[in-house]
Amino acid sequence: MHEFLKLELYPNLAVKKSFPAQVQEVKEQSFLILGPFDRGTLLFLYPEQEVLIEYVEEGCRYQFATRIIRRLQKPFFGYELLLPTPESIHRIQLRRFVRHKKVLDVCYALLNNNGELNWKKAKSVDLSSGGMKIATSELLPVNSLLKLQFYVELKGKIIEFLLDGEIKRVEKIPSGIYHYGIEFKNITRQEQDTLFAYVFQEMQKSRRTMADGK
């Protein structure tokens, strides 16, 4: 929780309708928000009313319940709310696996009984925290198990991934290239979270590029 964090406030816990607000100040036991607004008008909330707050940060959605302390009119129109304890803030998934088109250099090797790895090069077509699509000229059977190695840059830091994967589907492209849909196997929660944050970062970059018309 920090200043200028954008929130969605749900005034009725039984109705899934939210209104936008923004954190203006965080105190020791409370926080102040600008809004929420409904078509430009400050939404009426009463002291001790329980509300649900959601926000997105670092590619994850967070949710917590809190109560209204008082209404504010100066220096802005909004409310003071009870600050949640860290353990009362719950992370919820935005979607099981958000997929983003991204070209990366990928090394792959078929897993076999003798444990030898014959590394070959490919390119990624898209990526999610649950799997990736790669492009290569080699024909591989569905259900093959692979070792995958690739690198991503997250917040200026280069991170290596060495993951197991299983080919779930194959598509032949007219140019003679095969696209393979691969599901990551035995991936840790930390690895998934890092990939999710990377995909979210790249999606934000793409949106900014489109907004700038570049």
Image: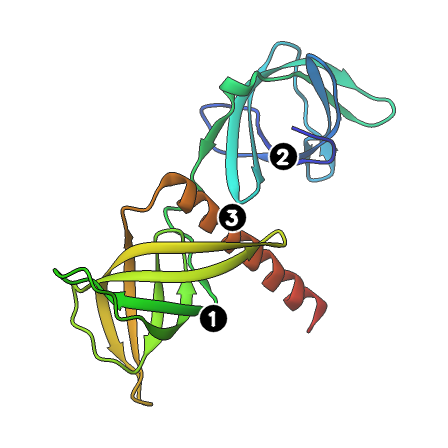
* Disc number lying in front (2 or 3): 3
Q: Secondary structure at mark 1?
A: loop
Toward the top, the furthest residue is 48
In the rendered view, tell whether residue 192 sits above or below residue 6. Answer: below
Between the residue at mark 2 and the residue at mark 3, the CA separation in whole angstroms equals 19 Å
Residue 168's x, y, as percent? Answer: 22, 63
Q: Amino acid at mark 3?
A: Ala
- Please tell me which residue is depicted at 47% across the width and 33% down the height of the picture: 16
Tag of residue 197:
3
Residue 126's x, y, as percent? Answer: 41, 66
Q: Secondary structure at mark 2?
A: strand
Tag of residue 103:
1
Between the residue at mark 1 and the residue at mark 2, the CA separation in whole angstroms equals 33 Å
Residue 41's x, y, as percent? Answer: 73, 33
Tag of residue 7:
2
Of label 2 and label 3, which has the lower sequence position? 2
In the rendered view, tell whether residue 134 sits above or below residue 164. Answer: below
Residue 51 occupies quadrant: top right
Pick the quarter of the image with the C terminus. bottom right
Residue 91's x, y, as percent? Answer: 47, 32
In the rendered view, tell whether residue 201 sits above or below residue 35. Answer: below
